[in-house]
Structures are given as C-alpha cells and as structure tokens.
Image (tube, rainbow, N blue to C red):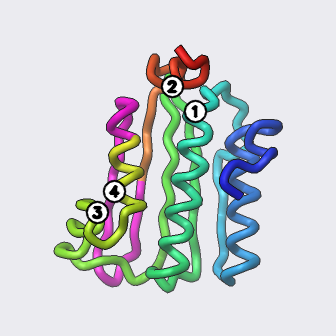
C-alpha cells in the first residue's frame, strides 16, 4: 500500500484512482476522481510523494472528517502538477487547523507541508468547521530536486 506497483506501471493518475476506490470500499464514503486519466511524465519521486500524501490525507478523512464524499483532482499545466483533495466533512475550527499544520495534532499534515516546501512546491490547507477541508499540493514536474532524487545525484 505504501508504493503499489500500479504507481510505477501505470502512473500517478491510475494509482490515485485505485487508492480512492480502495478507501471508498473500506470506509464507505464516495470518492470522485477528476483528471486522473491525463498522461504526464512526472518524476518518480514526485509521483511517490503525491501518492503517499493522498493516502495520508484520505486516512485523515477516515479518522476525523466524518465525510460522505471526497473529490480528488489532478491537473497538469505547463510544468506544474496540482493535486487537490476536498471532503465534505466536519472541517476544523481555525485554532485546531493551525495546530494540525504545526504538527501538534497531525504529524502527517506537517510532514506533507515540509516535504512540499523541501522540493519547492506549495501546500495549501483550507478548512472551516462545518464546511469540510480542501488540501492542494502543487509542484514543478521537472524540479531539479525531483530529478536529483530519481537519479540519486
């Protein structure tokens, strides 16, 4: 589950769809995927980072959000890839969302944010109590940090 063969054989989009279907079956919420059929050459390290981030975010949704629907969108534009995961769950109040990003309540969110910062990407977190949560990750497809990690240089 950490890095399934589908991620390497068929790409990030197919792996995200598989992950969404798996979570939907196991936890009973609907997962809708958009843009996962796009073909795009993304550095292996970035594919792994986005996949693991999606898994962590879906895990958080199952533990905390009480969501019935989750939307996952992948978008590529020029040299960037963006993944947005939105749920219709209970959301967080402003004070607790800051704690989650600081690592006090969720090491996972903190870790994702720090990894995105390390590769020069962006991490956006928007959550309001009673209105669900939206997390957006954006990174350069051919960022030198991503290429370096793939080649071991």
Residue 145 x %, y %: 45, 22
Inspect this view and state whether residue 63 appears: yes
For disc 3, the marked residue is 103
Instruction: Reply above or below: 149 against 19.
Output: above
Where is the N terminus found, in terms of image quarters? bottom right
For disc 1, the marked residue is 45
Find residue 113 and name its label: none
In the rendered structure, the answer to whether residue 31 lies left or right of residue 64 reads right
Lower position in the chain sequence, tag 2 or tag 4: 4
Lower position in the chain sequence, tag 3 or tag 4: 3
The quarter holding residue 129 reads bottom left
Lower position in the chain sequence, tag 2 or tag 3: 3
Lower position in the chain sequence, tag 2 or tag 1: 1
- Local crowd size for mark 1, using a 10 Å CA cut-off: few (<14), some (14–19), many (≥20): some
Real-space CA distance between mark 4 and mark 1, rounded to the nearest whole angstrom: 19 Å
Does 76 appear in magenta? no
Residue 59 x %, y %: 55, 70
Does 120 appear in magenta? yes
Find residue 110 and name its label: 4
Real-space CA distance between mark 2 and mark 3, rounded to the nearest whole angstrom: 24 Å
Labels 3 and 4 touching (C-beta < 8 A): yes
Residue 91 x %, y %: 36, 77
Lower position in the chain sequence, tag 4 or tag 1: 1
In the rendered structure, the answer to whether residue 153 lies left or right of residue 10 reads left
Residue at the outermost top position? 153
């Amino acid at each position: 589950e950490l890095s399934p063969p589908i991620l390497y054989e068929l790409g990030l989009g197919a792996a995200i769809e598989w992950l969404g279907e798996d979570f939907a079956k196991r936890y009973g919420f609907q997962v809708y995927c958009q843009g996962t059929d796009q073909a795009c050459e993304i550095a292996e390290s970035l594919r792994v980072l986005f996949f693991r981030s999606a898994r962590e975010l879906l895990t958080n949704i199952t533990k905390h959000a009480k969501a019935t629907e989750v939307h996952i969108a992948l978008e590529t534009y020029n040299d960037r890839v963006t993944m947005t995961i939105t749920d219709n769950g209970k959301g967080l109040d402003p004070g607790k969302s800051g704690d989650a990003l600081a690592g006090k309540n969720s090491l996972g969110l903190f870790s994702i944010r720090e990894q995105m910062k390390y590769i020069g990407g962006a991490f956006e977190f928007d959550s309001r109590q009673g209105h669900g949560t939206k997390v957006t990750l954006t990174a350069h497809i051919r960022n030198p940090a991503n290429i370096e990690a793939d080649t071991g240089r």
